[in-house]
Amino acid sequence: MNGSEAPPSFRLAYVPGVTPTKWVRIWNERLPGIPLDLVQVPAAEASGVLRDGGADAGFLRLPTDRTDLSAIPLYTETTVVVVPRDHLVTAAEEVSAGELADEIVLHPLDDTLDWERPPGRPALERPATTADAIELVAAGVGLLVVPQSLARLHHRRDLTYRPVTDTPQSRVALSWREDRTTDLVEDFIGIVRGRTVNSTRGRRPAAEEAGPGGRERPNRQEKQGRAKPQRSDGGGARRKSAAGGQTGRAGRRGSGSAKGSGGGRRGRPRRRS
């Protein structure tokens, strides 16, 4: 690499609500020489960013257009309804979508849930973003149904939320372009899947293959193939015959396959009755 080339780096996109902190920390521990750059993108633009090369991999929400993209689903989020703290919904631990039928439920343009039909009564206009919808809920205009991580992201003291049943759920996945599955992408996949540094499916630095002083560490098969030290009492010693050079074993009862030049056995003769 000449002086004009920039060092390799890894660009990781993520959508609002996803917290990649844990995986980034592990990356920095395992690959300290390769910077990881975080790129926050709107949920609707995440797949396009990966296709256009704006990121090497990214956390996005399913469903999404997965044409030419690989994806590993990671977890499914609870769906919640965001309400003012003094709303009647707060009296229950959870509510069903049917119980919101008489409520105005906001449906922002950046909504990430795969609705067949959103619950409740629609507002006159759809808010542009989830953040705008949160402001309207705080103003008492309506309620908002979102993945739990987005409710936490837009937390306000005057608002709270409750789980909603009978609604779509948001699945978070790690995705990347199929034709750009680089070594660094494989490294990050291993981190997300919980593989250890010594995992056979992960890449191991050459330095880890060597022991102290640079000596190569033997693998398990080499360890098993090493000869065990021979016993010093002669009972297990292997000998070559003078006649054919074949290797035999001189047993305690003299039953080895090698014969001396005179045809006699080297072992102790058997007693005859």
Image: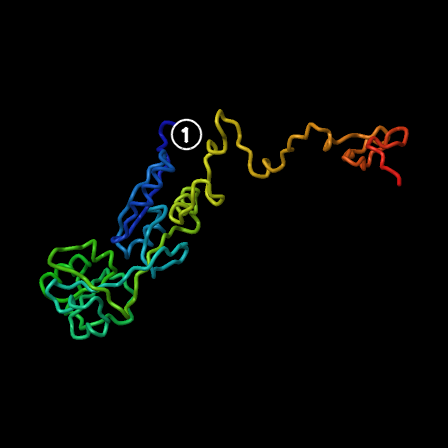
Task: Identify the residue at horizontal 29%, vertical 50% (top origin).
Answer: 14
Q: Position of residue 272 (x, y in %)?
A: 88, 39
**Horizontal side of residue 218 vs 141, given as left or right:** right
Q: Give residue 29's quadrant in the image.
A: top left
Local SS, label 1? loop
Residue closer to the observer: 205 or 40: 205
In the figure, residue 68 lies in which quadrant?
bottom left
Q: Which residue is mark 1?
A: 1
Pinpoint residue 16: horizontal percent, then vertical percent: 25, 53
Where is residue 67? Give x, y as percent. Answer: 40, 58
Q: On screen, 99 above or below 85?
A: below
Position of residue 199 in the picture relative to residue 124 (left or right):
right
Q: Is residue 135 above or below residue 256?
A: below
Residue at 31 percent across and 45 percent down: it is: 22
Horizontal arrangement in the rendering, residue 33 relative to residue 121 (left or right): right
Residue 169 location, quadrant: bottom left
How did the renderer colour the structure?
rainbow
Q: In front: 17, or 162?
A: 162
Of 141 and 258, the residue lying toward us = 258
What is the quadrant of the N terminus in the image?
top left
- Seen at 39% across and 45% down, the residue is 191
